[in-house]
Amino acid sequence: MSVFKLPAWVIKEIDKRRRNFLWGKGTDRGTGIPLLAWDRVCLPKDLGGLGVMNLRMMNISLMLKWLWLLVAKPSSQWSTIVRLLISSRNNTAPLTWNTLGSFFWKDLLSLRHIFTIATTAKVEDGKKTLFWYANWGAGHQFFFSNSTKPLNPKLTVYKALSNPAEVSPRPWQFHIHLAFSLLHSSLIANSSDSVVWNWNSTGLFSVKSAYHSLVFAGKTRFAGHALWKVKVPPTIKIFSVLLFHNRILTQDALLKRNIPFEEGCALCKQNLLETADHLFCHCSFSVELWNRVRGFFPTQIPSILQDVQTVMVQAFDRHNSNCAIILTTIWALWLERNNRIFKREERGVNSILHWLLMQHSLFEKAC
Ligand SMILES: [Zn+2]
């Protein structure tokens, strides 16, 4: 995985097995029904996923390391051998490297655009940094599309500054003049150009920073990201994420999937279509339990249980310990509902309250 680009079918097969394992397909420990889209399952927890590794992104992140070694550590043994095989061995811009070669080399160079975005050329003497193709800072990148290839693609920053006539700017005249004025005063004669990794504060490549940036690209943070720090077991956290995304198998969800069920709320015995909002917020049984819990935690439990999402967002906005009692109460209601449906066992509000207070105290100490 760190050497070759995994073929799409390999990732598909591995994901199929991971998906079946997660949802318990073919076992007696789960329904086998995928409750969350796999793309979302593979998102980091901060983005509302379950933090399962995205194989493609990890594959790319691991492979970027080879490009980093070639560009940033040219004196390493591996880099020396590989650089002998490529034509433009002295520049730090993979965009200009010869793509002919082995599968490994082709796979590696297919990532060069990502690498170019992830790095900045630190111009010192300007002799290794290509003027047109390297990302050399101050936001000035002159990546030419195929239709507008420069006449002199191997032009270095040093040569461009020595002989500005070599630059035929066309559309970016203004930017080039600005960049020239920035660079003129900053070239350092006896110091070699280097490359800085943009995706962390150290400026050095790490697989973790690459993976993190690739999976976070363009996505907004999950409103309930604080959930993962709450002192409750992982089972309750995963259940809470599913509930937040409205992905638990209440009767309205079963109806959408054409799965047969016995209609009616198992908790209050009303003959209605069970929804998450009813089960956890509006059901008379649940309201009674919430009121009893509120007696022990008067400031932690919201006074109005409008709907599940609002309750959870309110919980996440507060202190972690408040969130823990809310999630534990929701979990207790879900277990009671399942026991009544699948095991035909019933407990009263007092018994559940006693159990959940014990659990909450245990989680506070153990999690
Ligand atoms: Zn009910």
Image (cartoon, grey):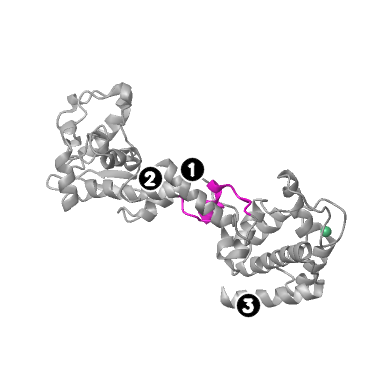
Q: Which residue is drawn at 38% across and 48% down?
A: 59
Q: What element does badge 3 sit on?
A: helix
Q: Which of marks 1 and 2 is nearer the N terminus?
A: 2
Looking at the rendering, the quadrant in which ligand 1 lies is bottom right
Residue toward you, 47 or 35: 35
Q: Distance between the residues labelled 1 and 2?
A: 24 Å
Q: Which residue is drawn at 18% across and 33% down?
A: 161
What residue type is disc 3 on? Leu
What residue type is disc 1 on? Gly
* Residue 221 is at least partly visible in this image: yes
Q: What element does badge 1 sit on?
A: loop
Q: Earlier in the sequence, mark 2 or mark 3?
A: 2
Q: Confirm or deny contact between disc 3 and disc 1 (CB under 8 A).
A: no
Query: Would you place residue 337 above or below residue 184 in this image?
Result: below
Number of residues whose C-alpha sits closer than 10 Å to that of mark 3, classed few (under 14), some (14–19) or many (20 or more) = few
Q: Mark 3 points at which residue?
A: 362
Q: Position of residue 341 (x, y in %)?
A: 78, 61
Q: What element does badge 2 sit on?
A: loop
Which of the two marks, 2 or 3, is nearer to us in this view? 2
Q: How far apart are marks 3 and 1 (CA)?
A: 39 Å
Query: Would you place residue 144 above or below residue 346 in this image?
Result: above
Query: Would you place residue 327 above or below residue 358 in this image?
Result: above
Q: Where is residue 111 in the image (x, y as percent from the top left)?
A: 33, 40
Residue toward you, 236 or 145: 236
Q: Position of residue 134 (x, y in %)?
A: 27, 37
Which of the two marks, 3 or 1, is nearer to us in this view? 3
Q: Residue at x 53, y 55 (%)?
A: 46
Q: Mark 1 points at which residue?
A: 218
The stretch of residues the image draws in magenta is 32-54
Q: Which residue is drawn at 30% across and 25% down?
A: 173
Which label number is shown at residue 6?
2
